[in-house]
Image: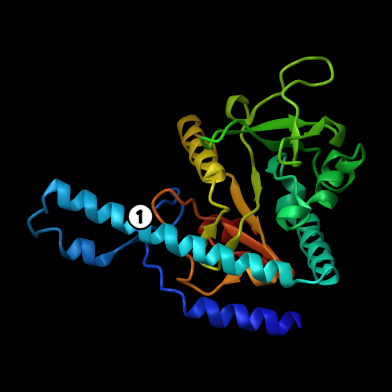
Amino acid sequence: MIKNGATSLMVRLLHLPRAAPAPTYRRRHHHLALLLTPSRLRASAPAPPASTAAMSTAAEQAAVADRKRALRSEVRRALRALSPEQRASEDQAIQNAILKSSWFKECKRLCAYISCPQLREVDTSKMLAEVLSPNSEHDGHAKDLYVPRVEDKNRNMRMLKITTMDDLVKNSMNILEPSPLDASGNTREEVLSASSPVDLFLLPGQAFDRTGRRLGRGGGYYDTFLMKYQELAEENGWDQPLLVALSYSVQIMEEDIIPVNSTDVPIDALVSSSGIIPISPAALARM
């Protein structure tokens, strides 16, 4: 049944309008830039009136947004079709692969999401328990862990340090987040104001592909935060962190299915139940 559901999904996805790359697909300095060749060929042509260019850009953005909504709907249906047994099996395989990896063992600071069963996100509970365990240093380095807290509806999100799962409280959406103050009433350390860099981000998402494209849930919180952190790292001369997404098998799309624009931040690597897929030069070097 799962196999037929996944096959049906891919058939429908292949009939979605193909998503052309955005004029500039944001990548960090160690990524290969994805630029549209036709725009270079037209460089010597007279520029269109500003009003025409603005209308064209708005129309293109609306088309990308429509394709994203359609794809999210398809993936949500595929995720609902996954049996609890299949999800549990993939959750275990994904977390085991990460916990056994050298790049995870060696990282000292990481940002990770708190998985939400209602959103059908890949489970992270086993990894978080390992990081927060008093004995976590036996198989690598002791790690500082930062998890997300959404501040408002304007894409503002913070990553706050926690030391135990008891630091988490449910928000209005019944999703676990860190409380802004610790047990002593002190403000929690925030990634964007920390004095040391983060080595790794473990990211959720709605769909991914093997070229690094990531489709979020539409809020823009992660893309906005990642761009801020990348700018901070560049200003401080820090190495950029690895951006690693966790994905169920039905969330991995064929190339060019996922539409993107200039504000979509690509991932460095993808982890599914089939294993770890390095994508960027940084991931290929470190994984």
Which residue is at the far front? Answer: 172
Residue at horizontal 22%, vertical 67%? 38
- Secondary element type, mark 1: helix
Give the labeled residue for mark 1: 61
Instruction: Name the foreground residue: 177 vs 100.
Output: 177
Q: Is residue 259 visible?
A: no
Q: Which x, y percent locates residue 230?
A: 50, 40
From the viewer's perspective, is residue 129 above or below residue 13?
A: above
From the viewer's perspective, is residue 8 above or below residue 132?
A: below
Q: Which x, y percent locates residue 119?
A: 71, 54
Instruction: Name the foreground residue: 185 vs 234.
Output: 185
Residue at horizontal 15%, vertical 46%? 50
Which residue is at the far top? Answer: 185
Instruction: Name the foreground residue: 107 vs 46.
Output: 46
Occupied quadrant, residue 45: bottom left
Residue at horizontal 61%, vertical 34%? 197
